[in-house]
Amino acid sequence: MNSSMEQLILGPMPVKRFLDEFLPQTRPRLPKFKKNLFAEAIPEKTKENEMYNPYIKVITDHKFIPRFKMVNTSYYIDKDIIDGPGLKPDPSVYHEGLDVSRKITQFGELELHSELKAHDSDDAFVDPPEGTDCRDWRFESFTNAGRKSRSQLIHYATEWFSRQHRRHAFTIFLFGTYVRFIRWDRAGAIVSKRFNFKSDCSYLVEFLWRFSHLDDVGRGRDPFVRRATPEEARIAHMELEEWKPKAERPVIVFTVSGEDGKAREFLAWGSMSEPRSLTGRCTRTYPVYEIVTKQKYLLKDAWRAHSLSPEADILRELRNAKVEHVPIYICGGDVQDGVTRTDLYVTAEEADEGWGDVPAAPPSSKMDGSWKCGKSWWRITQRFLHRFVSSVIGKPLKNFTSSKHMLLVVWHAFIGHWQAYLRCGIIHRDVSANNILITSDGGILNDWDMAKKEKDIQRSRRHERTGTWEFMSSLLLAGHHDRAHTIQDDMESFVLIVIYHALRYFPHNKKWKTAFILSKVFDDQERLPTGEYTGGTARKNLFLHNDHIGHDFQLSSPPLDRWVWFSIDAVKEWIETELEKSIPNQRRRIKGEERAHALRGTLRLPLHIETKPIPIHQRDLDDHEIMADFFADIFKAEDWPAPADDKPYDILLDLYATEKSLKRSLVPESEDIGRSGSSKRSKPSASGSRRQGSETQRSSQIRTHEHELEDAGRSGSSSKRSRQSASGSPLQGAETRRRSSRIGTSGKQRSRE
């Protein structure tokens, strides 16, 4: 959790300046109080859990937060957290009328959070000594206690923002005899200088007083999102029942500006996913219902980087150009006054904003940030709240029903990508499994928030290297960060999506290596000292040398198998020429009807053919057209498996179950009985993306017994393979058939490994 906010926290801001800039002066005036008020209430050497009630009592008795109440939530888990650990924040501030008799901890209602620690050494930050050059000082504490405190602060803020529609929020961080104030937004955080609140609590009391007199917007609430009325909630529960949230969520109403400038209201009942990051795009999507039109739509809520075009503008242009298989824009755009402020304290030079395709923010909007420590803030960028409505509510790609259905959905998304490029000159730049949705008509390519006109794309800013890690192209990952994002990068992403789902959900002859292959090819990464991540070597070598899958890899669905190999060779050819490498083992290139017959499975060529080098201008990925032919021809194949024989299943879950069974068989009977009723391992999620769950953790668990699984698989399934041979299993005799029928994208014959 600490690494997610690295180089995104600014401090230490002078305390008075913090108060004046973020919590303006208010009336009535603050009542009189003793400066050592908290010192008397909270003695020295008090344990943390003994600090809560005295802290609350002082604030409550002296009425420092009128209209609000502070509650000790440290013993009560918020039961409405989805897919995360239970959290018990320290004293929480709610509106005084909130009912906490049934649920005491409610992140969805939180107004102000306090984090209390017993010792000065628990400070998550370190102020520079007087006279020190702040640029050379590391503000974050790297003691164990400091790291733990900072991780807790970030974790609570992340959950808080995920449960509400906030532009910013405040935390009071109290440790030992000191206090800091923190202001969070989607660009980062600003932390005040610490002060001794026991010798003089003036700043703490003034903060509470000013905070309690702010309006909802001043405290960070989004004014264009409100709680639904009982009647609106009843309608939402009825119309949006299909998307009922996993945990209790209130019905809310979004106000969105229509194309005619008039406000439109949409009911929402829980988002389809909640962001697990405090900063960045933090995308949320909601199935919504409009009472006036009696129509259901999809509302998207995200924080776009200032360097990117509004997604609503992109979708409007695609709609006007009649691009197919993309969301149809309805209304919305940037939200009034929805903009971050953390970035205003970082200069263009410090943020490296003039580098590449990220223009520097207007100098007039910058604030004096000379008080902050550190010199490199390239991760911080200005962000705007962007909210719009589109017409299609799709289902995740992993809901496909067969290998043909999966490829059809990807094909439709590819068409949308192709038409957007041909008609509008727009490149998507974030083709991933999560961004391809199943619809009643096939599929769409969703999430155009990273899209740009090709003419506007220059070198990528380091932290805005675009794409989803698992499906980014090899060249973007493997040390080629300064190259412009091209349509070929996106086309490789389409290939990676098909390979991933083919490996994970359909039978093949490398089943026992599935977890290893997926983790190496799709998850492998290395963190550099700069905080950046690099990787992609395994991915590149899969295309160049068939590493991890081997030359003998074969899927049980013959058409899908042919498409995968054609596409692997197409990407290989592109990578080789981009890296200016010679093309080894030149082989004959096939075109036209010969290529079509090969894809349909009706052409057989001899294994070895004398060939000539392939001219660069004839590469298969030079444009969309040849890959489009791959798709079109493969659907004409006559050897697609029958739907009943081609149902997907999660091979990772199958391996996980096998691993658990194997581990149980290796435990002595007496020991196994002794463990009966002990701790249970939870069933892993079937999610196919790092954004959706614990894929990496699950792969790691499976890899733990990778060799045991392979050995068990070889010995335990030999008789089964014999039976499959007699019945003509599609995987049996793969190497023999490959000698006579395996043809790559360009008619390249494939030999044994």
Image (cartoon, rainbow, N blue to C red):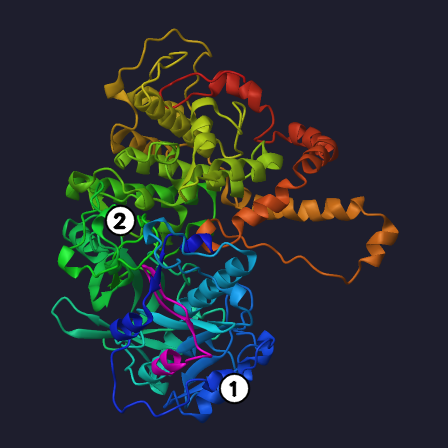
Res 240 → quadrant: bottom left
Residue 749, percent from left and from top: 44, 16
Mark 2 to mark 1 CA distance (whole Å): 44 Å
Q: Does the magenta stretch include residue 197?
A: yes
Residue tagged 2: 350
Viewer-closest of 12 and 170 = 12
Q: Position of residue 589 (x, y in %)?
A: 33, 16
Residue in the picture at 31% in, 21% down: 577
Res. 30 visible in picture = yes
* Residue 255 position within the rendered picture, expressed as x and y whole percent measured from the top left: 24, 74
Q: Name the residue beneath numbered marker 1.
A: 40
Determine the residue positioned at 28% across, 90% down.
29
Quadrant that contains the C terminus? top right
Indicate the quadrant where residue 21 lies.
bottom left
Amino acid type assigned to the residue bearing label 2 in the image: Glu
Comes first in the chain, label 2 or label 1: 1
Look at the image and say whether residue 257 sits in the magenta stretch.
no
Residue depicted at 42% across the width and 79% down the height: 109
Report whether 335 appears left or right of 100: left
**Observer able to see residue 430:** no
Residue 393 image offset from top left, x and y in percent: 34, 60
Give the residue furthest to the front: 131
Helix, strand or loop under label 2: helix
- Tell me the SS state at disc 1: helix
Side of 587 relative to 639 (left or right)? left
Q: Which amino acid does label 1 sit on?
A: Glu
What are the residue bounds of the magenta stretch? 180-206
Q: Judge depth for marks 2 and 1 and give the one in front.
A: 1
